[in-house]
Amino acid sequence: MQLWHSGRTIHSSLLDGRQPVSSSAVRMTDPVRGKYLDALGRREAEVPRELSEAEVKIIVEQFINAAQNAVCKAGFDGVEIHGVNCKQIVTPSLKYV
């Protein structure tokens, strides 16, 4: 099973209008990944809401619980953490949390 958090790479149109969240309020500017195509057409990436330290800790706990449930309750052999969005935390231009 693979677990991942979309961070700033998702658009509010895919979140029932809720603002994306990330470690920093920095909009994705990549010319390819910084645009979204949905039923309303192609749109620019949005500025995510910056998570508090407490919210980051909650998300970490949710990942731990999900991994435990996948292995101990659902019977998966293992869990992979999708890490491409981890660069949101370790990229120098973004805030470290």
Image (tube, rainbow, N blue to C red):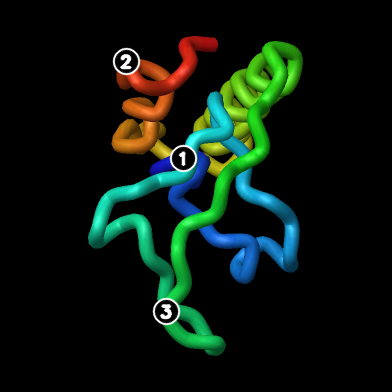
Q: Nearer the viewer, mark 2 or mark 1?
A: 2
Please report whichever mark, 2 or 1, sits nearer to the chain's N-terminal start: 1
The residue beneath circle 3 is 42
In the rendered image, residue 10, in percent from the top left (x then y), is placed at: 50, 55
Please report whichever mark, 2 or 3, sits nearer to the chain's N-terminal start: 3
Quadrant where the image shows the N terminus = top left
Q: Quadrant of residue 61?
A: top right
Which is more toward the observer, 2 or 30?
A: 30
Instruction: Tell me the crowding category of disc 1: few under 14, some 14 to 19, or many 20 or more residues within 10 angstroms, Cα based.
Output: few
Please say if 2 is above or below 37: above
Kindly report the distance in space between the C-alpha atoms of the residues bearing marks 2 and 1: 25 Å
Q: Quadrant of residue 15?
A: bottom right
Which is more toward the observer, 93 or 15?
A: 93
Q: Secondary structure at mark 2?
A: loop
Please say if 88 is above or below 2: above
Kindly report the distance in space between the C-alpha atoms of the residues bearing marks 2 and 3: 29 Å
Inspect the image, locate mark 3, and give the three-letter code of the amino acid beneath it: Arg
In the rendered image, residue 96, in percent from the top left (x then y), is placed at: 47, 11
Q: Is residue 60 left or right of residue 86?
A: right
Inspect the image, locate mark 1, and give the three-letter code of the amino acid beneath it: Leu
Residue 8 visible (yes or no): yes
Please say if 65 is above or below 73: above
Please tell me which residue is depicted at 32% across the width and 27% down the height of the picture.
87
Kindly report the distance in space between the C-alpha atoms of the residues bearing marks 3 and 1: 27 Å
Inspect the image, locate mark 2, and give the three-letter code of the amino acid beneath it: Pro
Residue 78 visible (yes or no): no
The residue beneath circle 1 is 3
Please report whichever mark, 3 or 1, sits nearer to the chain's N-terminal start: 1
Please tell me which residue is depicted at 55% across the width and 61% down the height of the picture.
11
Q: Is residue 54 left or right of residue 5?
A: right
